[in-house]
């Protein structure tokens, strides 16, 4: 079983973001970066498959030199080797990323290519399916369960108010939702071992970028907490606010 | 030399030879452990030996058992002198100390022998009474352990009886030989006056031989018994650091940069230090540690005694293999105790075992609150906690095994510099509008404050603890202290990560903090959190950070003492009880300052004490990273402690630690009680006269 | 003058609300771009063409109905091929999907097949010169990005509920079409569809969470919380660590640092003081309502709407009021 996991370096979403002076990106000062949450689930799911069935997991990430940190994290979790597709910046255009990844993955001989279902920074969630189309492979998006055996895979996809179980042949592309497996915490032993694992750097073939960010703004600040009243007398006011102000009822 | 002298000499030499063989064997097993320098500051170590070992100070923490043990122990020392006389006499019959000691000294010696023999007999009687009739809970172990204890008590009792009877029969035979100071032997002899000379001779010889052989038998039984502590504990106390020299309660430094390190922490005996292994030899399974353990008290499986015994069991199992001591491999010594797999095994099985998992389970290890009650309680200065800490390090650093709920804490520490998922940008939100400068602002103005207020994560992010932070800041402002905070630059001190075994994460945080503090040339740090206090003050020196760190309880006491804050007395409550924080008390010996502060702030209020208090205070349950773990087994520790505090009938509970604050507040809520929990800073702040 | 194609999502033979949102947005886009036609493409089992009038009512000039027995289940490969085929022949300026589970799956496939750029999960949409410009929540909804895509057709997916369906009647002429790829040849096959259970949704997905703390006083009082969740219709029930510690609720219900981290649109905290451990798990919720008897409780610092008082009295009354509001609203 040879598995590729495509991961993205994203800032910690707990941070309080500020807009950079360019007005079209977030201010990177003070932000902590790691692989995306869903990418972490994908790496864990991939490792669990190869731990059970043998094989190797390769992590791939596109971006400038700093993405090597993210790749090292994957290596410390147990990934065998890593590939950096070098680009000056990580583009917003998912199709450009998919093109570069597909070029790298095309002749890799992978049985399974895994993605997190979305990276929460650009929040597009399109790269996995686009890469699959470019490679002509079947794809299942947002899997919350995944089993592979005998050249076939079965997965569970979460839908609004339900789910579906799908079956597909390998090789295939899957994108991973939460619920599949909690990413392991790398032991220090793994961190030390990761320093010695191979990390290959290749240029990314991005091509034209049609989707771009023009500007950014912060949504209105959350107002400070307020007490609207005491006891059951306050209920009509609460219901009114939920309906008219918060629009959640 | 009579034939019997020759016979005795042969027996004596054999006995000593066998004992020496066993001693060198046990010492060889210690060499299995990692090196650890424990020779510095010999004077401080000797003092420990005099006070703790010879003076039996910790024994008296339990008065009845303490007196009993001290009598047996002191009697043992005194009577050893007599033993030597008897052994020499066995080889050369005419020998007596009377030949070498001046008269008065010999008289005193003679008196001491009889007197202590009687005292020891009395103590042995009491010991039998406890073991057979009272059955104190802490002495309950498995069968072997009990038999061993009874056997030893029986031997000591028999030694005393034969000693006295030897004197008695000698008195019958030759009334002038037994000195008058041996009053008890003589009195017994008077009572035996009716026996004939032959019977008396037989009785004398029988008792002498039984006594002498018992001594030699006892000597050679020790290496096969938990009573090895008779020999090992004095050395153990000398080499121990649990009461100094050096800062107490600090975790062992770890060099993570070392390239060749393959093993992080300990999963088996060879990863522990020789001192951890010597601890095993020194444990006589008295159970005082386990009786003081908050986890054990509340019905959890963790037992510090079991940890130490298991280290010893495993050493006895694996030591012979590692030292090539094939003779002992299948008849392990000192093998008995609680749990674990030790026993006669194949080499393969022995190698397939390890200390972790086979003897000490993950479950036990994660139940520890690192409160240090076990360490403080141990009469022979064993460090149970160090073994727990080293095993936790292995679990996290080598195997990434830990309760799943602490992973978010690790990840948040890494990303946000705080165990909770809060943004570092919110760290100083509590200070808005209070006119408290940050170090950066001070530096920008070219100023350097006298004191850095290290707020800590609880004090920065937890809404309840923020009130403590604000209260303390107001006290310092009232006292006109020139202080600053680090604001967003502060990070967790690393204690939770370190106590949870994640040394790597700890060092990342601690090194950042040391660099930051050094950049601001900080000298004096005050903090409201005992964990920050202990960590920065006592453990940062391992990473090159040297600061004077003062906990706010001490700092406030000093401000009051110096008259820099004036208090107008209190209203509201009429009595208050104080809950000791472990990292303040048992780790740093700060017991009086918070109490004194309370008395000064609340002069008309009665300060009540729960039964478990000061160095015996029960942990709140949050230490050792327990704050971030679920409590699955037994009663909740914070509820147990809250019940004790509520039972004092006090109108309020005072704490000096934000973690204790959370745990006690939750405990009061769980009990449905209506007793406020206040930090001492809040008590003082309310009493400020302005 | 440019036509816009809207993908009208259906499930089990019926249109979903997001289909109407897509048509509405397509209509608005076509109108502002010079008044082209809106074509809605709907794929389903035979009979799905019967939904065409609703699409027409919301602004579709033409409804392309692709009926096939295999489309009783979602068949991503065949449907993506069909939409792409239609796009190639139709000369559309844009193709609008919903960023629903199905739309998120379908839109990037179609974009890749056509080799064009796309915008995902947008909350507004307009034409600006040769680009289509949209607002797009990014960085875990903490930043609103204005994004643009050039080229034709531009693929866009709409955040569900961000566009309100508006009636704007057009012809809605039905045009039948065949799948562009044989559904029998699809490699990804749905084996089983699992209906959302009648029980409440999972905590991490639920749009509304009602959560209880120790202020409820006894485990049996959790039924008040459950009734309130019931009244909201689609709410999950959560609780605090203290409550799971006391064994009132299973650990899986715990919200907080050591439990689940949630971010619903509405979070109702009942009898919860708001300890740090709990706040860490729900702070990012959309609207927070708190009911607690202690006015000083930290939960009120983060609550948009707080009511001070006894949860045991307030909750039943609130349950009644919410039922009323939902019945009439």
Image (spheres, helix red, strand yellow):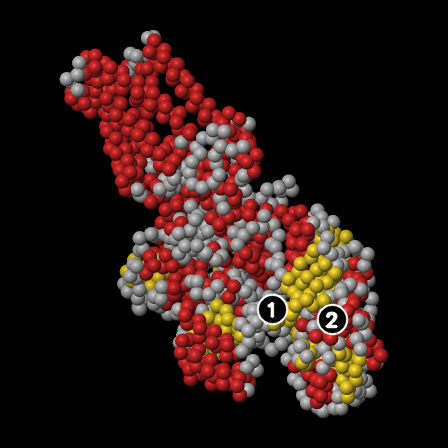
Residue A16's disc is 1
Q: Is residue C263 left or right of residue B202?
A: right
Dot 1: chain letter: A
Hey, which quadrant is residue B571 in on the image? bottom left
* Disc 1 and disc 2 in contact, CB within 8 angstroms: no
Residue pictured at 77% horizontal, 88% vertical? C173
Quadrant where the C terminus of chain B sits is bottom left
Dot 2: chain letter: C
Position in image of residue A128 (x %, y %): 73, 65
Quadrant where the N terminus of chain B sits is top left
Q: Answer whether residue A76 is visible to the viewer in this image.
A: no
Q: Answer whether residue B362 is visible to the viewer in this image.
A: yes
Residue pictured at 35% horizontal, 14% vertical? B8
Circle 2 residues within 10 Å: few <14, some 14–19, many ≥20: many
Q: Is residue A142 above or below residue B235?
A: below
Residue pictured at 53% horizontal, 88% vertical? C328
Q: Nearer the viewer, residue B45 or A163?
A: A163
Residue B447's disc is none
Position in image of residue B286 (x %, y %): 36, 40
Position in image of residue A98 (x %, y %): 77, 65
Circle 1 residues within 10 Å: few <14, some 14–19, many ≥20: some
Q: Is residue B538 above or below residue B488?
A: above
Query: Where does label 2 land, which residue?
Result: C76
């Amino acid at each position: 079983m040879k598995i590729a996991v495509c991961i993205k370096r994203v800032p910690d979403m707990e941070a309080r973001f500020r807009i950079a002076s360019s007005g079209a990106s977030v201010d990177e000062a003070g932000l902590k970066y790691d692989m995306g949450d869903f990418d972490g689930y994908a790496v864990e799911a991939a490792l669990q498959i190869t731990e059970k069935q043998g094989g190797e997991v390769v992590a791939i990430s596109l971006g400038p030199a700093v993405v090597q940190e993210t790749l090292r994290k994957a290596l410390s979790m147990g990934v065998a080797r890593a590939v950096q597709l070098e680009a000056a910046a990580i583009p917003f255009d998912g199709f450009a990323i998919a093109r570069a990844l597909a070029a790298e993955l095309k002749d890799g001989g992978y049985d399974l290519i895994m993605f997190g279902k979305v990276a929460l920074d650009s929040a597009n969630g399109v790269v996995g399916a686009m890469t699959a189309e470019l490679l002509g492979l079947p794809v299942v998006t947002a899997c919350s369960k995944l089993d592979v055996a005998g050249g076939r895979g079965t997965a569970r996809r979460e839908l609004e108010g339900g789910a579906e179980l799908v079956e597909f042949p390998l090789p295939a592309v899957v994108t991973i939702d939460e619920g599949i497996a909690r990413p392991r915490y790398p032991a220090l032993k793994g961190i030390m071992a990761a320093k010695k694992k191979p990390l290959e750097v290749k240029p990314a073939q991005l091509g034209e970028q049609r989707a771009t960010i023009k500007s950014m703004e912060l949504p209105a600040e959350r107002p400070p907490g307020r007490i609207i009243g005491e006891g059951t007398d306050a209920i009509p006011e609460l219901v009114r606010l939920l309906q008219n102000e918060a629009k959640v009822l | 030399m009579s034939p019997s002298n020759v016979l005795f000499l042969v027996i004596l030499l054999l006995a000593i030879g066998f004992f020496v063989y066993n001693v060198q064997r046990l010492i060889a097993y210690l060499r299995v452990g990692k090196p650890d320098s424990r020779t510095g500051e010999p004077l401080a170590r000797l003092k420990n030996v005099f006070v703790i070992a010879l003076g039996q100070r910790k024994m008296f923490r339990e008065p009845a058992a303490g007196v009993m043990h001290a009598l047996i122990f002191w009697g043992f020392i005194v009577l050893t002198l007599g033993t030597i006389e008897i052994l020499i006499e066995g080889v050369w019959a005419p020998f007596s100390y009377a030949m070498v000691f001046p008269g008065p000294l010999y008289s005193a010696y003679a008196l001491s022998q009889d007197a202590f023999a009687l005292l020891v007999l009395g103590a042995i009687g009491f010991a039998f009474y406890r073991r057979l009739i009272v059955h104190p809970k802490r002495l309950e172990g498995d069968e072997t352990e009990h038999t061993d204890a009874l056997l030893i008590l029986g031997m000591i009792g028999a030694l005393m009886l034969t000693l006295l009877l030897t004197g008695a029969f000698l008195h019958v035979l030759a009334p002038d030989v037994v000195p008058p100071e041996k009053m008890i032997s003589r009195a017994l002899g008077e009572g035996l006056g009716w026996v004939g000379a032959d019977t008396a001779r037989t009785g004398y010889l029988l008792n002498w031989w039984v006594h002498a052989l018992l001594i030699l038998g006892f000597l050679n039984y020790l290496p096969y018994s938990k009573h090895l502590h008779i020999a090992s504990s004095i050395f153990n106390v000398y080499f121990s650091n649990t009461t100094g020299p050096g800062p107490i309660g600090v975790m062992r430094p770890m060099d993570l940069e070392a390239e060749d390190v393959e093993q992080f922490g300990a999963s088996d005996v060879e990863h522990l230090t020789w001192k951890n292994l010597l601890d095993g030899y020194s444990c006589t399974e008295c159970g005082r540690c386990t009786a003081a353990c908050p986890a054990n008290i509340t019905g959890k499986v963790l037992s510090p005694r079991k940890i130490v015994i298991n280290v010893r069991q495993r050493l006895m199992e694996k030591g012979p293999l590692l030292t090539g001591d094939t003779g002992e491999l299948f008849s392990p010594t000192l093998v008995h105790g609680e749990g674990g797999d030790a026993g006669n095994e194949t080499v393969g099985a022995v190698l397939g075992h390890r200390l972790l998992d086979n003897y000490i389970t993950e479950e036990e290890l994660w139940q520890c609150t690192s409160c240090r009650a076990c360490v403080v309680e141990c009469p022979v200065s064993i460090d149970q906690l160090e073994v727990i800490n080293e095993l936790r390090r292995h679990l996290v650093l080598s195997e990434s095994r830990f309760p799943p709920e602490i992973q978010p804490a690790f990840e948040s520490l890494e990303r946000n510099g705080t165990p909770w998922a809060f943004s570092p940008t919110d760290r100083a939100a509590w200070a808005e509008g209070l006119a408290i400068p940050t170090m950066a602002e001070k530096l920008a103005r070219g100023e350097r404050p006298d004191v850095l207020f290290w707020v800590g994560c609880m004090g920065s992010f937890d809404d309840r603890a923020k009130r403590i932070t604000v209260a303390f800041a107001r006290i310092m402002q009232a006292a006109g202290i020139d202080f600053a905070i680090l604001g967003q630059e502060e990070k967790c001190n690393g204690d939770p990560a370190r106590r949870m075994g994640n040394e790597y994460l700890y060092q990342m945080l601690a090194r950042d903090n040391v660099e930051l503090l050094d950049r601001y040339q900080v000298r004096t740090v005050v903090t409201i959190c005992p964990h920050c206090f202990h960590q920065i003050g006592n453990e940062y020196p391992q990473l090159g950070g040297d600061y004077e760190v003062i906990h706010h309880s001490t700092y406030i006491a000093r401000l009051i003492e110096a008259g820099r804050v004036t208090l107008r007395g209190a209203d509201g409550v009429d009595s208050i009880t104080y809950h000791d924080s472990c990292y303040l008390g048992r780790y740093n010996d700060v017991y009086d300052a918070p109490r004194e502060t309370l008395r000064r702030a609340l002069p008309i209020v009665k300060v009540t004490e729960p039964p478990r208090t000061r160095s015996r205070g029960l942990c709140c349950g949050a230490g050792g990273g327990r704050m971030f773990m679920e409590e699955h087994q037994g009663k909740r520790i914070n509820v147990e402690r809250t019940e004790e505090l509520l039972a004092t009938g006090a109108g309020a509970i005072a704490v000096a630690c934000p973690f204790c604050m959370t745990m006690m507040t939750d405990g009061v809520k769980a009990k449905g009680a209506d007793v406020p929990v206040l930090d001492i800073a809040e008590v003082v702040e309310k009493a400020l006269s302005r | 003058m440019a036509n816009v194609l809207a993908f009208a999502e259906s499930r089990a033979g019926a249109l979903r609300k997001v289909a109407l949102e897509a048509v509405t947005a397509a209509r608005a886009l076509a109108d502002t771009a010079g008044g082209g036609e809106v074509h809605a493409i709907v794929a389903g089992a035979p009979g799905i063409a019967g939904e065409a009038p609703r699409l027409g009512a919301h602004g579709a000039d033409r409804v392309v109905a692709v009926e096939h027995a295999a489309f009783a289940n979602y068949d991503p490969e065949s449907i993506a091929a069909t939409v792409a085929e239609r796009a190639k022949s139709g000369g559309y300026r844009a193709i609008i999907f919903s960023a629903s589970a199905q739309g998120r799956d379908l839109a990037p496939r179609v974009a890749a097949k056509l080799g064009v750029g796309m915008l995902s999960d947008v909350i507004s949409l307009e034409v600006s010169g040769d680009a289509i410009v949209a607002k797009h929540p990014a960085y875990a909804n903490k930043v609103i990005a204005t994004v643009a895509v050039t080229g034709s057709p531009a693929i866009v997916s709409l955040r569900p509920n961000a566009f309100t369906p508006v009636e704007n009647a057009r012809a809605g002429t039905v045009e039948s079409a065949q799948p562009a790829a044989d559904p029998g040849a699809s490699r990804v096959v749905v084996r089983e569809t699992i209906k959302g259970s009648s029980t409440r949704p999972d905590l991490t997905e639920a749009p509304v969470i009602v959560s209880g703390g120790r202020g409820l006083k006894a485990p049996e009082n959790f039924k008040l919380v459950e009734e309130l969740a019931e009244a909201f219709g689609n709410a999950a029930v959560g609780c605090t660590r203290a409550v799971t510690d006391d064994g009132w609720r299973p650990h899986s219900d715990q919200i907080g640092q050591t439990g689940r981290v949630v971010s619903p649109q509405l979070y109702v905290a009942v009898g919860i003081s708001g300890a740090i451990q709990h706040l860490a798990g729900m702070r990012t919720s959309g609207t927070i309502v708190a009911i607690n008897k202690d006015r000083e409780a930290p939960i009120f610092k983060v609550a948009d709407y707080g009511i001070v008082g006894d949860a045991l009295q307030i909750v039943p009354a609130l349950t009644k009021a919410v039922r009323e509001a939902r019945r009439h609203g």
